[in-house]
Image (cartoon, rainbow, N blue to C red):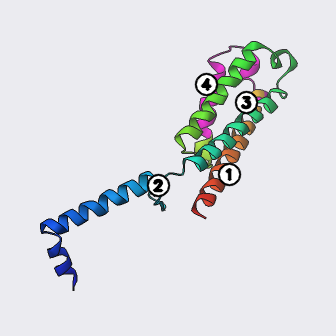
């Protein structure tokens, strides 16, 4: 039996029924994680537990790093409610990055995200310190390390998933 005969047999009623049964079976296997296909371009099947684990690790890193960067700020800002609010908003910027799952670690991406971080800070305070070179250096270093860390977690997760 050659390919043309197989294709021709699919045009009769039984062939169409068989094809529909196979398609429905594949659909339910993918839906119930019985069939998982992962390539560079497509990912079929449920890997939500691994994705939740990755997001949890990234989320923990963001919160821990924000707590750590607070100690680099001058004492008069460090323990204020305004500082906590600003750090929470900066955390939101990074959490949006991990939720859309598009993190890259190139210089242009870091520059764009630094702009978002600085805007989040400056929107909530007009204190001159937050416009100083000292603060911008702290923010730049923090942003670069944070993105590298989030990117590394994502890449480790992606390798773990395909293994």
Q: Please tell me the numbered disc located at residue 152.
A: 1
Name the spot of residue 29 as percent of width and height, x first: 42, 57
Residue at 69%, 43% in the rendered image: 57
At mark 1, the secondary structure is helix
Q: Are marks 3 and 2 in contact (CB under 8 Å)?
A: no
Number of other residues with Cα within 10 Å of mark 2, as a class: few under 14, some 14 to 19, many 20 or more? some
Q: On the image, numbered disc 3 is attached to which residue?
A: 136
Q: Are marks 1 and 4 in contact (CB under 8 Å)?
A: no
Q: Is residue 95 above or below residue 5?
A: above
Name the spot of residue 75 as percent of width and height, x first: 87, 19
Q: Closer to the N terminus: mark 2 or mark 1?
A: 2
Q: Please tell me the numbered disc located at residue 45.
A: 2
Magenta residues?
111-134
Q: On the image, numbered disc 4 is attached to which residue?
A: 119
Between 15 and 86, the residue placed more toward the observer is 15
At mark 4, the secondary structure is helix
Name the spot of residue 77 as percent of width and height, x first: 81, 17
At mark 3, the secondary structure is helix
Number of other residues with Cα within 10 Å of mark 3, as a class: few under 14, some 14 to 19, many 20 or more? some
Residue at 58%, 44% in the rendered image: 108
Q: Closer to the N terminus: mark 4 or mark 2?
A: 2
Number of other residues with Cα within 10 Å of mark 1, as a class: few under 14, some 14 to 19, many 20 or more? some
Taking the image as shown, residue 30 lies to the left or right of residue 60, namely left
Name the spot of residue 79 as percent of width and height, x first: 82, 17
Residue at 64%, 45% in the rendered image: 53
Between 34 and 125, the residue placed more toward the observer is 34
**Does residue 137 appear in this view?**
no
């Amino acid at each position: 039996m050659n390919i043309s005969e197989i294709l021709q047999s699919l045009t009769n009623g039984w062939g169409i029924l068989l094809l529909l049964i196979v398609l429905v079976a594949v659909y339910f296997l993918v839906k119930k994680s019985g069939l998982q296909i992962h390539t560079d371009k497509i990912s079929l099947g449920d890997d939500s537990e691994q994705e939740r684990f990755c997001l949890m690790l990234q989320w923990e890193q963001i919160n821990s790093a924000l707590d750590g960067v607070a100690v680099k700020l001058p004492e008069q800002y460090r323990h204020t409610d305004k500082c906590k609010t600003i750090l929470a908003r900066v955390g939101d910027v990074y959490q949006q990055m991990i939720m859309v799952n598009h993190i890259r670690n190139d210089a242009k991406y870091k520059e764009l995200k630094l702009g978002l971080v600085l805007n989040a800070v400056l929107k909530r305070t007009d204190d001159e310190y937050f416009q100083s070179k000292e603060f911008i250096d702290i923010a730049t270093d923090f942003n670069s390390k944070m993105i590298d860390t989030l990117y590394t977690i994502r890449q480790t997760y992606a390798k773990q998933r395909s293994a």
